[in-house]
Image (cartoon, rainbow, N blue to C red):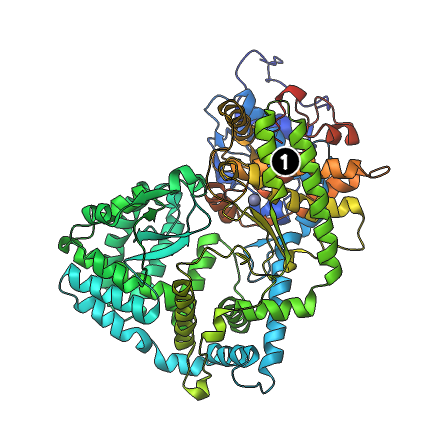
Amino acid sequence: MQRSDILKGYPDGSLALDGTLTRAQALVMLTRAFGGFAVPVGDNARMALPASSLTNVPAWAAEELSPVLAAGLADGDENEAMSAEALSTLLRRAYAAKGTNLKDDYYAAVNKSWLDGSDIPAGLSINGPFYGLSLTVNEQIAALIREIDAHEQTPGTAEAKIKALYDCVMDAEGRERAGVAPIQKYLDAIENAKTLDELVSVDAQMQKELGLSMLLGFGLTTDLADSSRRIAAFSLIGAGMDKDFYVNGADAQRSAYTTYLTSLLTLSGLGADEAAQRVAAFYDAEAAISAASLDPQDYSNVDKTYNLFTLGELKTLLPNVDLDAVLAASGIENAERIMVSDVGALKAAAALYDDAHLALLKTAARLALLQSVATSLNQGFMDAYFDFVLAYYGVDARQSNEQIAAQQVQALLADYLSRAYVDEYFSAKAKADVEEMIGEFIAIYKERILAQDWMSAETKAKAVKKLDTMGVKVGYPDSWESCLDRAEIKSPAEGGSFFSNVIAIQMAMKQDVLAHQNDAPDKSEWIMTPFTVNACYNPSANDITFPAAILQSPLYDVNASREENLGGIGYIIAHEITHAFDNNGAKFDENGSAADWWTAEDYAAFRQKCQAVAEWYDGQEAYPGIACSGALTISENVADLGAAKCIVAAAKKLDHPDLDKLFRAVANTWASTTSRQMREYLAVTDVHAPDKLRCNRVLQTLPEFYTTYGIQPGDGMWTAPETRVSVW
Ligand SMILES: [Zn+2]
């Protein structure tokens, strides 16, 4: 702050610097120091705090504060004391609002013109170079579908099935005519059940005929403790929304959700009063189950999710349910050991499975059935769903029915459309180039692991083994074999409907799983489709996957410089490799089985480093008033920090590396914008840090970042070297 008129003092001429600084005083100083604030546009406008967030504004400051309030930077109560921490938070908000100096807020400055001009296109809840790519991919696939639909197709081929399904989805008239008729017999059976036993029988019938169970059921999954076999998994009804929603959800969001559930019930034939009453009771039950459930950061924590039960133990929890019959209906042959992923939620739900809660369970079954098939019924159900999504996430516009139809076909016939997409849009050169980059990164990782001073030679050898055996999947799977080949998809002319085809696909998938239940899990199978704009590490297979759709501009470009590709796709590749050694991945061995391969001392040191990462992020504000939770985002942050070290190491192998280019590419990769509501939602549910911190907070750990830009104490991006964290 260098402007001389910042501190004007009290009318008597004193400055009262030993007194307490109030919010209004601090904000006035800030406004003068920054030469005022413009009315925010683009992302800053979306993230602005409402002016009413600052309460008890004194009359003397009202006029001078109006721009800073309009800029959405201020919150809190004027009558509360202002801490040094709160002052530095205000300063950071001001740096972000200005976005003029990359030494103060790197992400905001590098992305300023994009952020200021950003919008959110219909059909996206978040926009950015990264997210916009998925919209492009969807448009490309929609064009492929329309092209297939425009021609006659040979019966029985993948193209004929795509055409038949698309025609059914687009058959609005047929869908309106049918209404809820396709599921009427199940709705009636649910309502007519007189006992819990009868209701459970109806559930088993739906499992057999629709391939879906609404109230309880057994499934099959890879055994986390032994990735060479499958294990039965058991679940009951659970909460429909995230855990934080039931505790802290805003009224508007709660209302969006209950309105949606009520609409489902009325659209399926219940009266408005009855629907509202049933939703209220159902909501309370969901909230109670949610309160007993795992926290979102524990979903990938094998210590919390791998819980073994015998059928006898489950029977003790559910004394009123004929579990033998439920198991028989599932088609699963071996249930000697049964995995339960959320014991707290299961126990809370189990308490509801008796005749006294029959009415509640009927509502749960009815809503589950409607939610699983709603968008394949008529327009009323579609509208109810999209009204909910738009209101809940605070986004403005949905896509056209035609775009939505294409995406539904894309999701249902993913195997076929993946192949069509890859044939049309993916190059062999991109695959070879990215495979080479991955090989180089794995070699860098080995060097880095061997150089760690806190790890013993014994643990290092095992970590290197995990890298040596890591599977690499790039572009598309080796085999296009698909269980869709066994699904009979009928066009409207053949008597098919959207609903009947959804069920045919669902049943084909279920039969495929059951047919392979005694085989070892197939590790060559892809858990992401090639048209997904994302990437992953699968701890149960110890492999990394980079679908074709993510290997394109702006994240990867054969014509871009090496540094730009390192800051784009390079960051993402190295991030996925690091997941093998984040706080969750570290618990799996080279075969993908949960196992303790660390010495006790090394593991303790590792945990300590992970804890420091949690603290590095905890409380950091990416947007005014929305703090990052260090505990929620720890695993992704460990992966981001490892990724940054790796790409810088890769760049340093070049002659005269241009690190400025690399760091800018990182900032561009994570540029994004969304509604404030969505940011608030992500802050309590997303295990990734907000995109802005995936740039700024990560770069702040790299000495090369400070030297590239000459960042010094006093700059907004500065942190003292001894406070910077690192795991890998
Ligand atoms: Zn990740």
In this rendered view, identify the residue nearer to me: 244 or 121: 244
Is residue 463 visible in this depiction of the protein?
A: yes
Q: Position of residue 249 (x, y in %)?
A: 39, 45
With respect to residue 389, does 447 lie above or below? above
Q: The residue under label 1 is which amino acid type?
A: Gly
Q: Is 328 left, or right, of 691 in this rendering?
A: left
- The residue sitting at 67% across, 69% down in the picture is 423
- The residue sitting at 43% across, 40% down in the picture is 302
**Which residue lies most toward the right here?**
655
Mark 1 surroundings: few (<14), some (14-19) or many (≥20) residues within 10 A: many
Q: Position of residue 496 (x, y in %)?
A: 42, 82
Q: Quadrant of ligand 1?
A: top right
- The residue sitting at 39% across, 75% down in the picture is 499
Instruction: Say whether mark 1 is within 8 Å of ligand 1.
Output: no
Screen quadrant of the N terminus: top right
Q: Is label 1 in a helix, a strand or a loop?
A: helix
Q: Position of residue 203 (x, y in %)?
A: 25, 64
- The residue sitting at 69% across, 64% down in the picture is 426
The quarter of the displayed image where residue 150 is located: bottom right
In this rendered view, identify the residue nearer to me: 28 or 703: 703
In this rendered view, identify the residue nearer to me: 86 or 228: 228
Q: Is 116 left, or right, of 603 in this rendering?
A: right
In this rendered view, identify the residue nearer to me: 551 or 477: 477
The quarter of the displayed image where residue 72 is located: top right
Count of numbered circles on the image: 1
With respect to residue 658, does 204 lie above or below? below
Is residue 98 visible in this depiction of the protein?
A: no
Residue occupied by mark 1: 642
Q: Position of residue 390 (x, y in %)?
A: 47, 58
With respect to residue 174, does 214 lie above or below? above
Screen quadrant of the C terminus: top right
